[in-house]
Amino acid sequence: MDATERIVNLAFYLASAHRPVSAAEIQAHVAGYSAKQSPEAFGRMFERDKEDLRAAGLVLTVDRDDVERYRLDEDATFAGTVALTRVEAVELRTAAAAMLADASFPFTDDLRPAIAKVVAAAHTPAGHAGAVLPSPSADEAPEAQGAAVAELAAAVAARKRVGFGYTGAQGRGSQREVEPWGLFARDGRWYLVAFDPGSDGVRIFAVSRMTGLSVAPRPKTPDFEAPVGFDVTSYMLMPFQYGPRAVDATLRFNGPAALRAQALVAGQGRLAPEAAGRYAWTVPVASEELLARWIVAHGPGIEVVAPPSLAARVRDGLAEVVRIHA
């Protein structure tokens, strides 16, 4: 029996099991495994098969008590029916076409067949993807970031340590070996959330600042386990929030900025409505300089309420711009 047939048998067995099953039960009842296999040989084969199931989108959970037992998480594995109108299908295809044409997008091999299935199911013509002009998600070395993110994403999935050279915001270089927990993109840059044993804490690394990326060998053997309940979205901070927290800043959104308030704050801090359609936003800040730049970039209609030092930084920066260009 070939590996594909064995893996299909394993998937059917897990899907039909009414309770978590042990590896010994799987070896005894799933066609393709042999009772004559040594524990080591079966263990290696079973680990590879589990990884192939996960790569196919099947979510396996492990109950650890006296012995490890496995079950298929049906709620996480099987998505509900998605009904798209023709307009929604066209919009989705247009967004996908832009990503497929973006050198910084690392998952084109997964997206291309997925969008083909969506288009076929929605009965919409394929159209011409070339007519869509991409807006690169990475504004620094998009091809390099896309390749690095693809490699990091594989390391996250396989739970393998990665090493790289890293240049911090202050220009200091260091060598890191970390446990990669998750990836996200924000404001044109990809970031890695990882546990750094060297600093004994969770750190966020900009992929564009990495050099010499390497992944630990033996991809089928995990090096670590991410903590239960880890959620990468909780680390998706704004550029001025990375680093030791220094102060809480309060801004007021007026006019055009008030209309975009929900989008501007990106889920960070505390946004409170005020009179006359205004909003007050209180947010923790690590770098007042970067926040001042953010205010200027996203105005007009953003007023600094506190602290005074931030208001002075914005005022002085604008005065310098006027001086240079007057």
Image (spheres, helix red, strand yellow):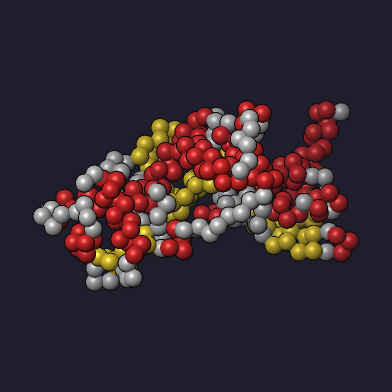
Visible in this render: residue 77?
yes
- Residue at the right extreme of this rendering: 276
**Residue 94 position within the rendered picture, expressed as x and y whole percent measured from the top left:** 64, 38
Q: Residue at x 49, y 47 (%)?
A: 183
Residue nearest the observer in this picture, 201 or 311 = 201
Asked whether, in this view, residue 18 is left or right of residue 28, the answer is right
Q: Residue at x 33, y 56 (%)?
A: 11
Question: Where is the C terminus found, in terms of image quarters?
Answer: top right
Single out the residue that lies furthest toward the front: 123
Q: Which of 152 and 275 is in front in this view?
A: 152
The quarter of the displayed image where residue 30 is located: bottom left
Residue 271 position (above or below residue 175):
below
Q: Is residue 65 left or right of residue 85?
A: left
| 10 versus 188 height, above or below | below
Residue 86 screen position, x and y as percent: 67, 46
Residue at the image position 49 percent from the left and 30 percent from the top: 144
User: In the rendered image, which quarter is residue 104 located in?
Assistant: top right
Q: Is residue 187 visible?
A: no
Name the side, left or right, on which 298 lies relative to 40.
right
Quarter-of-image position of residue 227 = bottom left
Q: Is residue 146 above or below residue 271?
A: above
Residue 249, image x, y percentages = 71, 56
Percent x, y of residue 53? 35, 51
Of residues 105 and 261, the one nearer the viewer is 105
- For the point 50% across and 57% down, the residue is 79
> How many numbered marks have been drawn onto this rendered protein structure?
0
